[in-house]
Amino acid sequence: MNQEILIPGDQPVSENTVMKKSGLALFSLGMLFFLISFTSVTKFSPVLFFILSIILPCAGALMFFTAQLKGSLPGVKKNNIQFLSATNRGLIGWTVAVFLTGMYILIYWFPELLENLIRIFDPLSYTFNGHPANQWFLYGTLYTIAVLVMGVRMIVHNRHNKYQIIRTFSVMFFQLVLAYLIPMFIQNGFFFTYFWPLKQDYLFPSSYEYLVKSGGLGMFMFFWAAVMTFIATPVLTYFYGKRWYCSWVCGCGAMAETLGDPYRQNSDKSLTSWKIERWMVNSVLLIITVITALIWIDSANKNFMLGEFAHTANKWYAFFISAMFAGVIGVGFYPLMGARVWCRFGCPMAAVLGIFQKFFSRFRITVNGGQCISCGNCSTFCEMGIDVKSYAQRGQNVIRASCVGCGVCSEVCPRGVLRLENGPVEGRYELNNEYLR
Amino acid sequence: MAENIVIIGNGITGITAARHIRKRSGSNIFVISSESKYFYSRTALMYVYMGHEKFENIKPYEDHFWEKNRIELLFEHVTGINTEKKQVNLASGNTLNYDKLIIATGSRSNKFGWKGQDLHGVQGLYSLQDLDLLEKNTRNIGRAVIVGGGLIGIELAEMLRSRNIEVTMLVREKSYWDNILPAEESEMINRHIRDHHIDLRLSSELDEIRGDSSSRVRSIIMKTGEEIECQLVGLTVGVRPNIEVALNSGIETNRGILVNEFLESSVKDVYAAGDCAEFRTAFPNRKNIEQVWYTGRKHAEAIAQTVCGNRTAYEPGIWFNSAKFLDIEYQVYGLINMNIQEEKNLYWENKEGNKAVRIVYTDECVQGFNLMGIRYRHEVCEKWIREKYSIEKVIENLGEANFDPEFFTQYEKELTEKYNLENPGKNIRLKRSRKLFRSLFNNSKETA
């Protein structure tokens, strides 16, 4: 037998491969230092270990993305995403999920185990506000860094699409400035990008009293929170749909749209999951609304029967919903269930915005004539698990309470069928496509 | 008793027919396919190979849809049709009686009798089985040659590149898909193909395919004598109607199953639609055989009416189609590259050479739109063509047609300037571009 032997993968090593590998090497080295930073060796020089375990992996990741930028043409970048262990719920995906979940548990409930790691953030924390770092400073910094670095990746991968570029800059900006820099300077635990009911206590009587006591800025912040919840939310959602918040401003959205982008395809698209989603998200909204109301009644009326119950309920809510669901599961399960588990099943803010979007909004995704070929890309890459193609193939506008308007369905559509649009509220639901019936 | 409606083929044509018949009648509907039990989107096969989607993602309906709509799916192969007894013979030995029969068996890949075309590693790309074969044939290979420069050819090239397989494309024509695309657009795609590191050989023809001792492809020889080593040969030189089931059944065939404008075959109660049907008389500016997703869908809608007692002729309507060449989207509405008498072309291309708009028009009215890398609204373009808008009226309102996502650069102004420049004395002004503030407050029916 003289069959030629073909040696697989025998291809010339390009410059980009070298750059990619160097980037990954730096990243891995940085992660190694990150682990070392759990030990007391960080005392030797916090600055040095900050550089080695935080800056180094970021530099490595950015180097990798730069290599991707140079080595590819602008266009949809989804090749092999269903085959890669990191993105198809494979071994790497599970490892990342366990790591992220574990980090959340440590930060939330076992910060003393992170003591050495927290110390390397001291220099940065002193620069900001003259205090030593704590676990929340560590969390905020890592969170913001993840959004920024993975935001660069998002832009590199979507550089053919201006909507995605501008939107990604927007979430990066709001996370960095309004949810990180300003709060770290002001130091009163207030984030300008979160409102009631997502941060339920911003509109609690205790916040009101605390902020009023702290003077003009405090007044402004309570005023800001109230205006955002009761005026900006309905008005902006009327004009643009819930996307103005969920995929442009919100910090959870910022993480989902950057770090979470490689996991979109893992959201469940079945009819059953849609049912579960509606029940869950609206129940959470109902619960927190009731709790908030009871707490206000209690504060106005000292002998209120349900006062103690309300405060206890709020504690349980803070533990199960705000910490467990939004934090641990919300981010930890990214590689397994897509990046919007919290937004889809748990976020009460998303529920409010969703109700507005469904009934009082100009937003919809329109279908272009008869061009849909039912290829399924739109549904596959919908992070909210909306079966977009079921609308597209019958020429019906996509109007769903959960749609965050990320624009990815429109982007991955190979036939240019979908467009995010604002238009008259009336007639949004009419099925008037003459090509598809 | 309810009628038996039997549909052979579960592609877009067969399934559209089944769905529309179900909407109108309580008949028993059987859909037979030996390719796949469930309907899937053929045009999306490439995304499964490239790892964008799983197979379940390209099924347009969840599996419970069929039972709910009482459409019975038979995963069976049809061996013949007995038109006397009104029976369909199945490979399992069973027969199925029909009152009405719809043949929607689609196409099969062309082969032109090349030496070596049956070697292992030589294949077309049409069916689910082809995809399976491709998966096996491309395991650990380094280089492939694709013969043919149509839509499937470029899709196959994109698929193979996603697995880092080197690709050479042999295109017989002097420019990619130049029987459909006008010269400039075709040249744009030539450049784009090469930018993607695909070795595009224009005006090149295959002479023979050579194999090794185990009958596996080893290389191809071009007409020029040049030999290219490869481990896969993709034959994508078009498709032909798949009419095997109709042969020897008394149903009249030519290249396809011959039908009239009602999609009725020569035998009563037997219809054919989609890729496998051939119109005895072609519609104006159309081919006898229409092999497009959208035409198949439209044939099926007409048939569904007829089968349900409302005899309806197929109305081809204004032509439209779309595709994606690697990263460049393509949409066409109306008549493009058809050499209409006294036609004029307004053509604009961006500086980077990857976006273009072409409007074909006559002195009387606008005839067609060809878009590269830019999305235009189907309804609007069609309305302008149907209602015979003049070129100037179209240009003034171009903003209305633009369907690109928000924040995308709009080129209608440049297009207008180009028209004014090419037509001295004209000073057309773009009346409406797509503006954000318009979209906020306008309450007219259209969106912006």
Image (spheres, grey):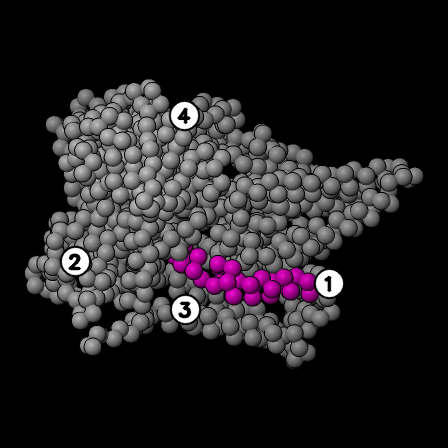
Q: Chain of mark 1?
A: A
Share a chain, discs 2 and 1?
no
Residue tagged by mark 1?
A: A109
Residue tagged by mark 3?
A: A20
The magenta span reads: A77-106
Dot in front, 2 or 3: 2
| Mark pair 3, 4: CA separation | 65 Å
| Mark pair 4, 1: CA separation | 67 Å
Share a chain, discs 1 and 3?
yes
Residue tagged by mark 4?
A: B2
Image quadrant in which you'd find residue A301: top right
Question: Looking at numbered disc 4 in the image, what kind of residue is underneath it?
Answer: Ala
Whether residue B371 can be seen here = no
The image shows residue B421 at horizontal and vertical percentages of: 20, 33
Whether residue A276 can be seen here = yes
The image shows residue A326 at horizontal and vertical percentages of: 65, 52
Q: Chain of mark 3?
A: A
Q: Nearer the viewer, residue A162 or A352?
A: A352
Identity of the residue drawn at 20% across and 26% down: B260
- The quadrant of the rendering that contains the C terminus of chain B is top left
Q: Do labels 2 and 3 touch, CB within 8 Å?
A: no
